[in-house]
Each structure stands twice: as structure tokens, then as C-alpha cells.
Image (cartoon, rainbow, N blue to C red):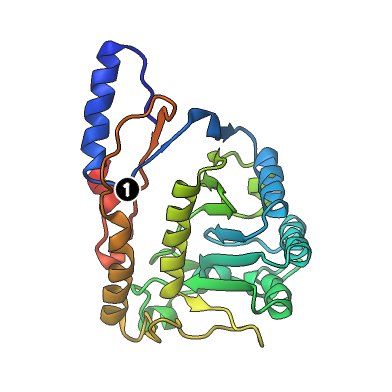
Amino acid sequence: MCLLQENACQEDKTRDIIVGLVGRCPHFQINGDAVCVLDAPGQFLSRLKKQISGSCKRVIIAALYLGTDEEEQVLVDTLREAVVKNKDLRVTLLFDRTRSLRCSKDALYKSTLHLLFPLVKSHPDRVVAYFYQTPLLTPLLQKWLPSRFQEVVGVQHLKVFIGDEDIILSGANLSDQYFTNRQDRYVQFRGCPGLTDWYARLVTAVCRFSYPMCPRRIGFLLPLATSIDPTGNPSGFKAFARDQLLPLLSPMPPNPMDADLDTWVFPTIQLGPVQITHDEEVT
């Protein structure tokens, strides 16, 4: 959310809104010049690739899924080239497990796992991939629901793309249609370490209760932090996930308004299965 000051009356209204949100959300003051709204799918892809290629320390990508055709292969190749070029670079990937297991009959790769496996296997100490699964997908539902319909039960929808201190927030998935002709929202924040670090912590928190991809074979390990299977012990899983996410929502101490920092950003989180409804409460 970006709030701009225009005149005295508007300034008072803006201040009231900001004060209300500061008490309920994490918040970040940035310079409006750091915000760039991307206006086309092709621009989203080119900025994402450039952000990956220019990163020296970290690349963090969270999305519903990664497609399995030529455009997505190019993106994975970009990640591979960045890892080879920058020896200190660490890559963290987070996708939805159910969606990533959906098989693609006519694509280059059978699934997201098959596309990512060579990269993870080649650099297991620097590239890690995680896959979130909703605790609402019980063993009975997994048995009787076709794979595509299992996604209706619940998926993770984070769309976060980090390269060092730059971040793109979007509604777009990482698939060819979102790179070519399917318009979505894309906002890039450049040189915003506080905001970027917060989203990095968010993705890291979700990774703690997600399935790590096995670097030795195509498959999953149990979540490392808990060894709790979300379908086998959903109550324990929900409690752990909630404990990981709630600290991120703690309001920060208010800062005095800075004329050079004319834009405020208020992140929110929504994860109904673990009783976190922050976004709907705030908005």
C-alpha cells in the first residue's frame, strides 16, 4: 500500500490512515523513486532475469508453481548461470507442493520437480527448494480427489521475487503465459533492504514448515524444522506454522515522518488454515 501526501486536508487524512496501520502492521518508509510499476508480462520476465543475474548474495523466489516448458527452462538456466558466476550466491525457492506435482503431458518436463532437480542436485549446498502443503488436504482427500481438484482444498499463493536488496511483488505465476500475454500486477522495489529483509523472513518462515526437495532423487523430505507431516499431524503442524508467522506481524515502533521517505508500505499475511487472518482484518 502506498500513501502519498497531496495537500493539507489530504495530509491529515493520510496521517490518520498511517497511524492506524502502524499500530496493526509491520511498516516501511521508502522513497517513491524506488518503486517501479511494471506494465507488461515481457517486462516482468526481463526484470526478473536481470534481478537474478545481478544478485551477489541471495535470490529468493516464492510462487504458486513454476511452469515446465521453454520459457521456464530459460528462467532456471538464468538461476544456474547466476550460481556459477557468483560463488557467494544462495538461492531459496518456495512453491506449492500439490500444484508442483501436477504432471504436464506435452511440456518439456513432467513437473516442476523434474525441471528443478538438476539445478538442486548440482548445487545442493547453495540451491534449496521447498514445497508447502496445506494441512487441510487429509489422506482421505488425497486418496479420492484427482490431483487437479486437490488444489481446490488449498494452496500457497506467495508471489515474492528477491534479488539482494531488490524485490518484485506480483500476482503472477512463473509460467509462459504470465511471461508473454497474461497481464497481472508487478511492482518492483529497488534498494529497499528493510522491506526486502521482511519478505525474506516471511519466505524463510514458510520454508520451515514446508517439504524440502531431496537433492539426491526426485522427491521430498519431511519439513526439517519439525518433521511434522501436515497431513499426518495437522494440529501440530498448524501450531508450529502459526508460531513461525505471528512474530512477523508484530507492529514496529513508529518512526517520525521523513520528507525524503514519502511512501509507506504495509505488508499483510493471510493463512486461514492456521488461523492467521491478518489481511482481511486490516483491509
Residue in the foreground of this view, choosing between 143 and 276: 276
- Residue hosting label 1: 26
Q: Position of residue 67 (x, y in %)?
A: 65, 61
Q: Position of residue 279 (x, y in %)?
A: 30, 48
Dividing the picture into quadrants, the one containing residue 61 is bottom right
Q: Quick check: can you spot residue 224? A: yes
Residue in the foreground of this view, choosing between 184 and 61: 61
Left or right: 18, with 116 as reference point = left
Amino acid at circle 1: Pro
Residue in the foreground of this view, choosing between 75 and 140: 75
Task: Give the total of numbered labels.
Answer: 1
Left or right: 161, with 123 as reference point = left
Residue drawn where x is 34% and y is 54% of the image: 269
Residue drawn where x is 56% and y is 42% of the image: 191
Q: Quick check: can you spot residue 110? A: no
Q: Position of residue 10 (x, y in %)?
A: 29, 16
Left or right: 114, with 205 as reference point = right
